[in-house]
Amino acid sequence: MESSTHPVPSGKIAGRPKPTRPKRCLSCGTSLIKPNRRYCSKACRHQINWVLSLSKGLLRTFNARYAAFCFTHEHVILDVLPVWSKEISRFICARSNGKKPAEDLKNLILESGREWHHLVNNNTSKSYASLSLLTKNNKENIDPGSIKPDAKVRPRLSKHETSCLKILRLDREDLSSDEHKRKIRTAYKTMAKLHHPDVGGDAGKFRQLAEAHQQMLLWTQNPQYTSRKALQGSWSYDGYTNRWSPPL
């Protein structure tokens, strides 16, 4: 998740800040996270999911086709692209000291909801109240395509195939290209030079390597992939499915 030290200026906002490294919790941005985890704790994960679920009412009110949520050290940002519009409306508020982004996002959602209800209670139609808030927060200089999620293709592997991939010292990304078979064979040849018994290697490890090589070549004969739509570095909302997806 995004977590930057640079403030977001209120006058000219061309886009969302880019994600930083090292890997951070998708919910609060802390770098105090265990390896291969996306959240620092279950509580943190549940909190952001609950608040994003809360936002769906507001997004349906705005008839959002797409939306995106991200945060920096200074702000939380909710971008909305209505079905009928070609321009993004950006709802933004400053971060509060000692609070997590989910808490600040909740405050932003509740405040926007209160403003919408205030307009309706003053004899404004619901559609006009939505239009007024979206127009008030309209940002013409933000590319609408920036919050349209891309499809992320990821190789689908069994637990055994995942173990074989580790033995060959390959990553899943190595299987995403058309050259996956060549990469598997190259990895095998490289590792075989280290573990072959003829060069002093361990016979057991070499057998494991050979089996892993054959297993992954079998996978290439009928490769399986999973696909999901999401954004790089931002939570994304799809109005057709009424679902939020975590960042890629």
Image (cartoon, rainbow, N blue to C red):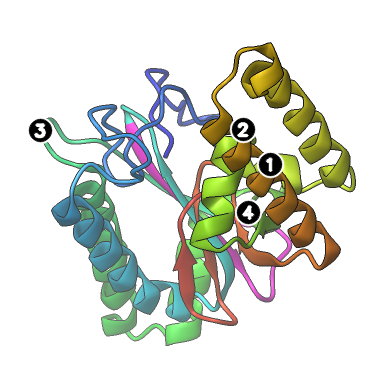
Q: Nearer the viewer, residue 183 or 40?
A: 183
Which amino acid lies under the numbered mark 2 shown in the image of this protein? Phe
Mark 1 residue element: helix
The CA distance from mark 3 to mark 1 is: 53 Å
Q: Residue at x 28, y 52 (%)?
A: 105
User: Residue 100 magenta-drawn?
Assistant: no
Please report whichever mark, 3 or 1, sits nearer to the chain's N-terminal start.
Answer: 3
The residue segment tinted magenta is 75-88
Please report whichever mark, 3 or 4, sits nearer to the chain's N-terminal start.
Answer: 3
Q: Residue furthest front?
A: 198
Which amino acid lies under the numbered mark 1 shown in the image of this protein? Ala
Using residue 22 as the reference point, say whether residue 141 is left or right of it: right
**Residue 94 percent coordinates (x, y):** 28, 36
The CA distance from mark 3 to mark 4 is: 29 Å
User: Mark 3 — residue?
Assistant: 98
User: Mark 4 — residue?
Assistant: 147
User: Mark 1 — residue?
Assistant: 210
Q: Nearer the viewer, residue 29 or 206?
A: 206
Q: Residue at x 43, y 44 (%)?
A: 70
88 above or below 64? above
Q: Residue at x 38, y 75 (%)?
A: 56
The CA distance from mark 2 to mark 4 is: 48 Å
Tell whether label 2 touches label 1 (CB within 8 Å): yes
Residue 206: numbered disc: 2
User: Residue 78 magenta-drawn?
Assistant: yes
Q: Is residue 142 visible?
A: no
Which amino acid lies under the numbered mark 4 shown in the image of this protein? Ile
State the predominant SS element of the stretch in magenta.
strand
Disc 1: CA contacts within 10 A as few (<14), some (14-19) or many (>=20): some
